Amino acid sequence: MKGPSYVTPHNIKQLKRLNQVIFPVSYNDKFYKDVLEVGELAKLGTKMLNHVLNICEKDGTFDNIYLHVQISNESAIEFYRKFGFEIIETKKNYYKRIEPADAHVLQKTLKNLFPGQTMESHKSN
């Protein structure tokens, strides 16, 4: 049987290490203390993204999800593409303390309407 997929005091060091490798921003100890208190909501990696997507889809009021990724972070861009995100624009000098400073804006559309279909006709189906 697999262990819990949420963050515990036993695996918080792994999360810290992952974040140091993945993100150009360093998080302080308070961040990790808060993550532990959130418990099951703070799922790792793919599980965390799936968790957010499921919440948004169940809620039904979200049209799109947006996120920023540093233009040089190809593995992150690839990761999000697998989940249906696409690059919609690039913001110059988005990051203040890292190079390259530009960020891609990625978007995932949650409501797939047929062309010409309005939200109202979509709801009544």
Image (cartoon, grey):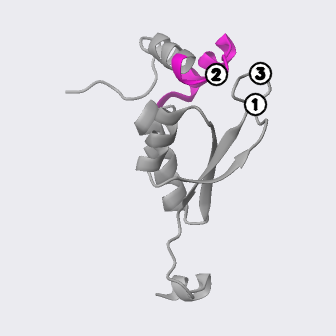
Could you tell me which secondary element the residue under label 1 belongs to?
Answer: loop
Marks 3 and 1, Cα distance to the nearest angstrom?
A: 6 Å
* Residue behind mark 1: 95
Q: Residues within 10 Å of mark 2 (few under 14, many from 20)?
A: few
| Residue at 79% in and 35% down | 93
Q: Residue at x 56, y 29 (%)?
A: 38
User: What quarter of the picture does the N terminus occupy?
Assistant: top left
**Position above or below: 54 against 19:** below
Vertical placement of residue 93 versus 7, above or below: below
Percent from the top left, x then y, of residue 101? 73, 31
**Label 3: how many Cα within 10 Å (few below 14, some 14–19, many 20+):** few
Q: Amino acid at mark 1?
A: Tyr
97 left or right of 26 in image:
right
Q: Which mark is residue 24?
A: 2
> Residue visible at 77% across and 41% down?
92
Mark 3 and 1 residues: CB-CB less than 8 Å, in contact?
Answer: yes
- Residues at discs 2 and 1 in contact (Cβ within 8 Å): yes
Q: Amino acid at mark 3?
A: Arg
Residue 97, label in figure: 3
Q: Which residues are magenta?
A: 21-40
Front residue of this view, candidates 62 and 67: 67
| Distance in Å between CA atoms under marks 2 and 3 | 9 Å
Residue drawn at x 41%, y 38% as measured from the top left? 47
Mark 2 falls on what kind of element? loop
Q: Is residue 34 magenta?
A: yes
Tell me the number on the disc at residue 51.
none
Q: Earlier in the sequence, mark 2 or mark 3?
A: 2
Q: Pointer 2 and pointer 3: residues touching (CB < 8 Å)? A: yes
